[in-house]
Amino acid sequence: MKLLKKRSLSPYMLALVAALMAHAAAKAQETPTLDAETNKKLLNASQGAIVDLPGSILTEKLPMNSYQKIVMPGPQYLISDDPEYIRVPEAIAFREAVEPGTVRFYLYNVNGVKEPQKINTKIIAVIKNTGKAPMHLRMLKFSSQKPTTSYFYAGKQGLADFFASTPQTTFRTIQPGSVVAIDPAQEKFTVKYDELVHGIYEFVIDQPGEVSVLQTSPSTSTTAAFARITNVLPGKSQSGAGRGIFGVSNYRLLTQNTIDTKNGVSQIIVADGKQDTWVLGKESTSGRIATLAGNYGVMYNMEIKWKSTDGRGLALVTWNSRSDNGQWCGAMANTMVVSKGKFKDGIIQLPSDKLVTKKAPEAVLVQVFPPAANGEEQTIKLTYSPPGASCLPTPLIFIPVTME
């Protein structure tokens, strides 16, 4: 092998290389331009409506707006979604201890009994008072849907109901050692094969307790079934987000830089498991560390800074970016709380004109924000939680629009 003599580049070559690198960087950051027809579509669309957008906008390659997540104080957080499908007629699928204080519990389980035949069941979330004094339980926020095979509807409507709910003024009393349904309505529902039982419950208790999810026959009393079931089903891991008690229930999400309309289209991506990592916890039945794949039930309070130095407004849209990633990503249905813009502030189901959005060129209009008269910085506020049953991640695309 011959040794090559080291050469230095001439100033001309160095300048050429620098120019080529700058050109490549500029190309990489190029953003699509909005034609007049697409601009008009966005301005004329109603809030939550599906709008067809070009592929240059609906792409995961748009420039990213970086953000920071701050863990905020919040309730003890539990989720029951493993095994998602309860395959045996009578079983406990989830069990976790909770301390006095506030608890958020996400119930997401399906009647999966098909052998030797499909049967009707009931699926109930219960709480046992494991303390020595009467427990007082008061519901703070509450969302519960009837058993359904429309999982998208359950996830979308479930968030809408949760965001809209208000604290109850009354409480229930649970004697030491007693077991009651967290949601008494569940005891009256018959769950057919493949139907989902879905609920998001945030409540406060003043004694230690134990939350469980059980499946039994519609004619069996909850207390009798609870008393005779001695073991908890193992997790399956093939489906479902996970189960356990998790260390994060609320995030505050802040953009690190101010979005400027002069810089063109950009995006934020949440619930991707990478930039927005999955929350960890513990599954007490096995004693293992649990991963909440999807961060379902975790509440994100977002503050997104933006300004207009070119006089344009900002349209916010979302879309199902992973529609080709297998059978579970064929559609997306979401609900958010969004601050005032062209439309009033409040809860918006996405989409609002259909149950789901499917794939590009479909986008869903969340809000249009007019520019400030003097171009000063403004703040977009969003309350978001990854929607149950829908494909993730959730892209938030910010599109500068010429206001008419």
Image: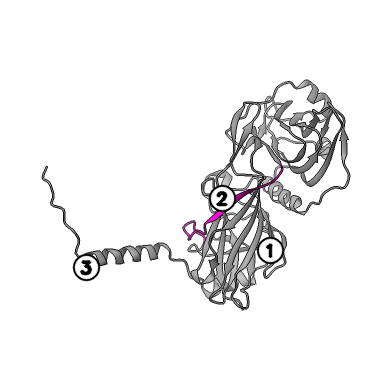
Q: Quadrant of residue 190?
A: top right
Horizontal and vertical percent position of residue 175:
87, 30
Sequence-wise, the earlier of marks 3 and 1 is 3
Horizontal and vertical percent position of residue 266:
52, 63
Horizontal and vertical percent position of residue 147:
75, 41
Residue 393's tag is: 2
Residue sitting at 48 percent across and 70 percent down?
A: 33
Taking the magenta stretch, the answer to whether it contains residue 368 is: no
Where's the C terminus, which quadrant? Answer: bottom right
Q: Report the residue marked by disc 1.
A: 339
Q: Does residue 360 appear in the picture of this structure?
A: no
Label 2 Cα crowd, 10 Å radius (few <14 / some 14-19 / many 20+):
many
Taking the magenta stretch, the answer to whether it contains residue 63 is: yes
Residue sitting at 65 percent across and 28 percent down?
A: 284
Which residues are drawn in magenta? 58-75
Sequence-wise, the earlier of marks 3 and 2 is 3
Q: Does residue 78 appear in the picture of this structure?
A: yes
Where's the N terminus, which quadrant? Answer: top left
Please state if 201 lies on the left or on the right of 47 as rendered.
right
Residue 175's tag is: none
